Amino acid sequence: MQDVSLRKILYVEDDADIRKIVSMSLEMVGNYAVTACASCAEALQVVDDVEPDLLLLDVMMPDMDGPATLRALRKRKSAEDAPAVFITAKVQAGDIAKYRRLGACDVIVKPFDPMVLPDRIGQIWQQFRSNGYDIAG
Amino acid sequence: MTSPDEIVAAELARLSAEFVAQLPKQMRAVEDEVTAWLDRPEDPKRFEIISHRVHQLKGSGSTFGCPGISRAARLLEKRIGTYRRQTDAGKPRAAEDVESAVAGLQNEVIRAGEQSRDPEESR
């Protein structure tokens, strides 16, 4: 697989404080270009302009949750091939496998340390570039 | 010169202080929403509202330096789920468990406030 570096992240999270600190950390510590959205509807408005390399999606959001948001984004040409990472505080036995079946490349469990998140995202990206995964789940 | 790590850490500290400051307000909302939901447990909208709020507290508590909030919110989330699945006969006991978990969360809110006023106490 061609070596392509991760640059653009489309991040969807309804909690404003978490959205702010994660965006700051990914941008300032990880040097990624982050477009942060509060909802699926917002993400759909910007995804074609952003053409994200990676989707970072909170699982539990009102109206449209992470998996529903991913399904909606996947219908856009600009996001159909981007690996998706779910963020969730709800992880029970079997949940990670379930989220992978729903199309996630990997899952980040809340709570997480915002300072180490950029490294974790970088690792997930490298893993994706090395091994790929079934985008459709 | 301030490094990016220091800037992010400073912002995290600021947001953590804000998080703790608004916890009492969040707690009042949790209490009101739980009371309203237990009055009308068949209302899916009320369940959705309380679930979402408690889930957010669980996810953001530890991120903003309050692991006790995350633990207490996790317990409340679990008990809310148990109550919802209970038969009518089991609901009174399950409701008591929910109220006890709400009280546990309230204690953690008080503790988080005290620790933010006196950080030495958290050590």
Image (cartoon, rainbow, N blue to C red):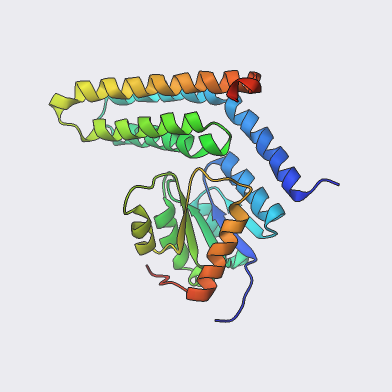
Counting the numbered discs, the total is: 0
Quadrant placement of the N terminus of chain A:
bottom right
At a point 43% along the width and 50% down the height, the residue shown is A59
In the rendering, at what x and y percent does residue B74 appear? 39, 34
Q: Is residue B7 left or right of residue B72?
A: right
- Residue found at the far right of this picture: B1
> Relative to residue A40, is residue B83 depicted above or below?
above
Compare residues B107 and A44 and report the one nearer the observer.
B107
In the rendering, at what x and y percent does residue B48 appear? 36, 37
**Image-quadrant location for residue B40:** top left
- Residue found at the far left of this picture: B89
Question: Can residue B24 be seen at all in this image of the molecule?
Answer: no
Question: Can residue B19 be seen at all in this image of the molecule?
Answer: yes
Q: Is residue A116 left or right of residue B28?
A: right
> Relative to residue A116, is residue B108 depicted above or below?
above
In the rendering, at what x and y percent does residue A88 appear? 45, 48
- Residue found at the far front of this picture: B123
In the rendering, at what x and y percent does residue B6 appear? 75, 44
Compare residues B83 and A49 and report the one nearer the observer.
B83
Quadrant placement of the C terminus of chain A:
bottom left
- Residue found at the far bottom of this picture: A1
At a point 21% along the width and 35% down the height, the residue shown is B85
At a point 48% along the width and 29% down the height, the residue shown is B69
